[in-house]
């Protein structure tokens, strides 16, 4: 018949003095207190691994920081896991790792991950603008909050100052980017649900203002004014170039000689210079080819890789 172990008492625990060698006090059911020569008293749960069938010690804290009542409850929980075929030590290690990951998955860290992916579909300048706006208006307040703990209330409270300042367009864009970040987090397995989908509905909406356009009947006047304007020839050619090709200002100003296909009369803008990261080909009309020849005369073909290089004083 197995020897019965008498449960420990608080009196025994308090009076357990260190000896020249460490020794063990048993509470029963695998729970033990190890007393070291330096006086440290450590709780151990000794059990048989449910899969490997070997004896394992699981540390459950030190006495008196972990009380007898608390450690007995921990032992009961560990035995419950064993009955389910789960090793309590492995389970605890996974829980600790999970908590560390949760604390590391802050809004700022996930934003940086999202932006790294976003950069593949936008220009570097646009990506920098996105991060600057978040860094200025959102990350100082919520950057260190684990993304799983972000709630509509927290986010709305952080963004309300923008509404009070009347920066409604900035606010709209940040709400849009927050939603993108949360969708990225959900699709990456960091969160199960995007709870911030509709936060934009909690704010006033900006008044939509379409950019002013020039009516077709005003174009002759514009061209006439452009021909009379006291501006550098390079500047005039660049304006005409953009009017003819209908590209973004940065794409026009960054045009390079090696992008021109003289044989096929095409301007091939490489993917890395386009907002959508796709090569864009533009047929060159007779007027546009004339502008290129004019720029050859001004800057000298080969003098610069850029067609509209920084101007020089042409009067010298």
Image: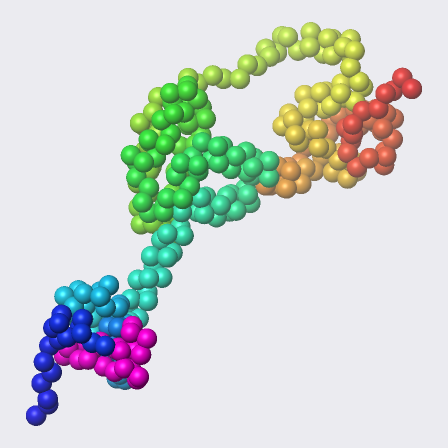
Q: Nearer the viewer, residue 205 or 24?
A: 24
Q: Position of residue 174 (x, y in %)?
A: 43, 32
Position above or below: 48 against 279: below
93 vs 46, left or right, is right
- Rendered residue at 34%/35% (across/down): 155
Queried whether the magenta region covers residue 32, the answer comes back as yes
- Rendered residue at 38%/56% (across/down): 101
Position above or below: 101 against 239: below
Q: Position of residue 307 (x, y in %)?
A: 78, 31
The image quadrant where one finds the C terminus is top right
- Rendered residue at 73%/29% (across/down): 284
From this viewpoint, is residue 138 visible? yes
**Image quarter for residue 119?**
top right
Q: Position of residue 287 (x, y in %)?
A: 76, 22
Q: Nearer the viewer, residue 297 or 139?
A: 139
Span colored in magenta: 18-40
């Amino acid at each position: 018949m197995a020897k019965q172990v008498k449960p420990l008492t608080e009196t025994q625990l308090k009076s357990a003095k260190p000896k020249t060698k460490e020794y063990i006090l048993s509470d029963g059911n695998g729970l033990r207190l190890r007393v070291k020569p330096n006086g440290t008293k450590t709780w151990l749960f000794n059990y048989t691994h449910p899969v490997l069938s070997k004896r394992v010690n699981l540390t459950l804290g030190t006495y008196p920081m972990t009380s007898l009542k608390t450690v007995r409850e921990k032992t009961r929980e560990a035995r419950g896991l064993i009955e389910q075929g789960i090793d309590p030590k492995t389970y605890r290690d996974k829980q600790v790792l999970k908590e560390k990951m949760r604390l590391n998955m802050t809004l700022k860290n996930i934003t940086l991950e999202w932006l790294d992916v976003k950069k593949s579909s936008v220009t570097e300048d646009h990506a920098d603008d996105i991060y600057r706006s978040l860094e200025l208006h959102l990350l100082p307040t919520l950057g260190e909050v684990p993304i799983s703990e972000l709630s509509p209330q927290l986010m709305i409270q952080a963004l309300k100052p923008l509404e009070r300042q009347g920066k409604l367009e900035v606010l709209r864009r940040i709400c849009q980017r927050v939603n993108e970040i949360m969708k990225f987090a959900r699709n990456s397995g960091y969160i199960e649900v995007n709870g911030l989908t509709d936060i934009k509905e909690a704010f006033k909406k900006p008044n939509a203002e379409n950019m002013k356009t020039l009516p077709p009947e005003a174009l002759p006047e514009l061209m006439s004014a452009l021909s009379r304007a006291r501006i550098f020839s390079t500047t005039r050619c660049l304006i005409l170039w953009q009017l003819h090709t209908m590209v973004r200002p940065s794409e026009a100003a960054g045009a390079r000689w090696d992008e021109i296909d003289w044989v096929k009369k095409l301007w091939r803008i490489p993917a890395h210079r386009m907002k959508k990261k796709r090569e864009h080909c533009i047929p060159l009309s007779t007027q546009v080819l004339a502008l290129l020849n004019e720029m050859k005369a001004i800057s000298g073909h080969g003098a610069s890789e850029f067609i509209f290089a920084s101007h020089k004083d042409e009067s010298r």
